[in-house]
Amino acid sequence: MDIRRGIAVSPGIAIGSALVLDTEGVVISRRTVPAEQLPAEKLRLFAALARAATEARSRERILTEQIGRDVGILTGHAVMYEDATLRRDVEKLIDDQHYSAEFAFSRHIRAIIRRFDDLPPGHDFTRLRSDFFDLERQVLNQLLGVVPSEPAPPAGEPVIILAADLTPSETAQLDPQTVHGFATESGGPTSHTAIMAGALEIPAVVGIGRFLHDVSSGDTVIVDGGSGLLIVDPDPATIEKYRRLRQAATQESDTRVEVTLRDVPPVTRDGVRISLLGNIEFPTEAVNCIERGADGVGLYRTEFLYVNRTTDPTEHEHYEAYKAVLTTLGPTRPVVIRTLDIGADKFSSASAMLTAEKNPFLGLRSVRLCLKNLKLFKTQIRAILRAGVHGEVRIMFPMVTTVMELRQCKSLMAEVVEDLEEAGIPFKARIPVGTMIEVPSAALMADVLAKEVDFFSIGTNDLVQYTLAADRNNENVAGLYNPADPAVLKLIKMVCDAAKARDNLTVNVCGEMSGEAMFTPLLVGLGLRQMSATPRKIPEIKRAVRNLTIADAERVAFEALRMETAREVTTYLREQQRRYSPDAAD
Amino acid sequence: MTTKPPLRRSVVVNNPNGLHMRPATRFAQQARVIPQRVTVFHGEKRADGKSSLDLLMLIAMPGAELWVEVDGDETTDAAEAIRALCDILAAPGDDA
């Protein structure tokens, strides 16, 4: 058994036999043609380019139908086959050097690829290399009359494709019915191949490094797309473990299992009730929270109201979107509405006030943007207060960095309340106000912030990013981004302690961390009694809660806080998870 | 006869991936629609605006300042064309 680690780009588990694809570029030997054949040679080139363009467009169309949206990468290739500059440059090689069309095209594309090779390692544009290898291969296939050897395994036999790299065209042709996963030696998380795998929902791991010489077609392999692992020749116990994991994953979405868990409360074995809430993005998802037995909506993101449009949303649009969710959740379940949480570059009216930011994640975004754009902010606050008459609404401000910002938000709310009173419009005056804790300064000042609010909500995704100063989408530093890092745990502990000292102020966690059962004992042990996750994850978290006692959880938190590295913490938490939830996945 | 100077405008690349495959494709497709010559400058480098390949080779990262030139003057339809082309470069689209 051989376990290789790569970059996880598309989640899911695939078990099957390997199909090793030789995707090394075709080597074309230098060939020249007699002068009188040059016009014919150029015509061959033009015809091949035209056919390659047609082919790319038709693949793009098929892919669009398959996944229901436009990817656009193969259209990009088509436009390039029709590129006059490209044609002229290759034509010149044929005219001046008397090269064959194949050799001229191959040589020219390789020259382009070399210019990408000269960029510093990890440069964003180097990922275009695989696109150009793709262009080369497609045109050569046309010139040589090669019918591309498509990955065509025996019907019904699931395979896992292993390759040095897959070009976007090749990925687009993979049929999820037969190709259950793939793993490649090169590639990064943002390559076009990775984007396609995600769109097709095929489990995939890329950037593994050299491994193809150790594996041959027909070997049994496992792709663990969630953890970024490729397991070659797994032993029977490992196969069995992954079979169960795969089955468990399928069962997560199996409504029968959810129904049995839906009507039992999330209570620890020693009787402590934990609130489990759902994170939603669109009003239509509110019903998913009810179906999964959530206690309410812990995070209602409102960015959808602002993006992909040319004007800002009206108060009425806000109001309708909030009313819909509040009505679905009923009079007693809380709905926490988070005010606008994006950068100015993402939507219309604010983009005008934006001069290009060198460092947008440390720039004008989220509540900072709202406090500079009071009209926009007041419109949203007014709608939230008005929608309050339809249910148990709460308001939450994101990315608060200083207590002054929080006070500004609150005084703005007071102004809006006055306006509504004067205008005689029905609204709810006293709604709970919360702040997100997602930058280190807020965690460090939690004792001060606690005096200003009715609840905290720890946004772990941003808290991890800002604490460790690492963007998880940047493959060069993604390894630093880890919610299990002791620095992150210490900040969460600090926030919980500050809340406890102030009459047990409610603290919620709403990042991806709260949706991973591995972290449930730790979070409960740190003092959290409320967690908010994507509705799909709620049954799993509920099961983890029901397997715990508070004493167990506190011991786990105590031990984890003494550890020095994220790796130690992760290993320990996995071990504890197996101990307390032997039936669950790790 | 003197040749008139072309229309010239500067624009900052706002796409978080820079002038990558998809924006370059959109730009070239748009530029191919008009008869005039379109040239894009990035520092010392220049690209034929009708060639997505040329545009990619500008290696323009997010925040890069580009100059777009279209033959013609304010009174011709070149003015409308250059505006549409600059909009593509300035668009903050999330795609690559």
Image (cartoon, rainbow, N blue to C red):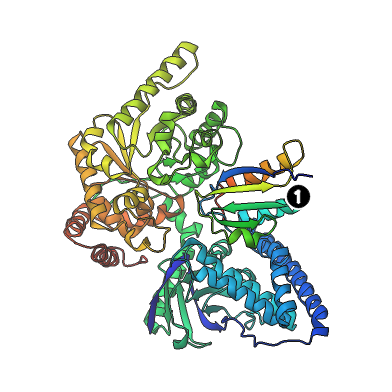
Q: Is residue A274 left or right of residue A358?
A: left
Using the image, determine if residue A161 lies above or below residue A296: below
Using the image, determine if residue A49 lies above or below residue B35: below
The chain that hosts pointer 1 is: B
Name the residue: 54% across, 55% down. Answer: B60
- The N terminus of chain A, quarter of image: bottom left
Looking at the picture, how far across and down is residue A583, in whole percent? Answer: 35, 67
- The C terminus of chain A, quarter of image: bottom left
The amino acid type of the residue labelled 1 equals Gln
Count of marks placed on residues: 1
Circle 1 crowding by C-alpha within 10 Å: few under 14, some 14–19, many from 20 = some
Q: Is residue A98 left or right of residue A270?
A: right
Using the image, determine if residue A520 lies above or below residue A53: above
Place residue A530 in its image quadrant.
top left
Q: Nearer the viewer, residue A298 or A353?
A: A353
Q: Secondary structure at mark 1?
A: loop
Looking at the picture, how far across and down is residue A269, in whole percent? Answer: 26, 54
Q: Can the viewer see residue A8 in this picture?
A: yes
Name the residue: 59% across, 68% down. Answer: A131
Q: Can the viewer see residue A83 in this picture?
A: no
Q: Nearer the viewer, residue A509 or A459?
A: A459
Residue holding disc 1? B36
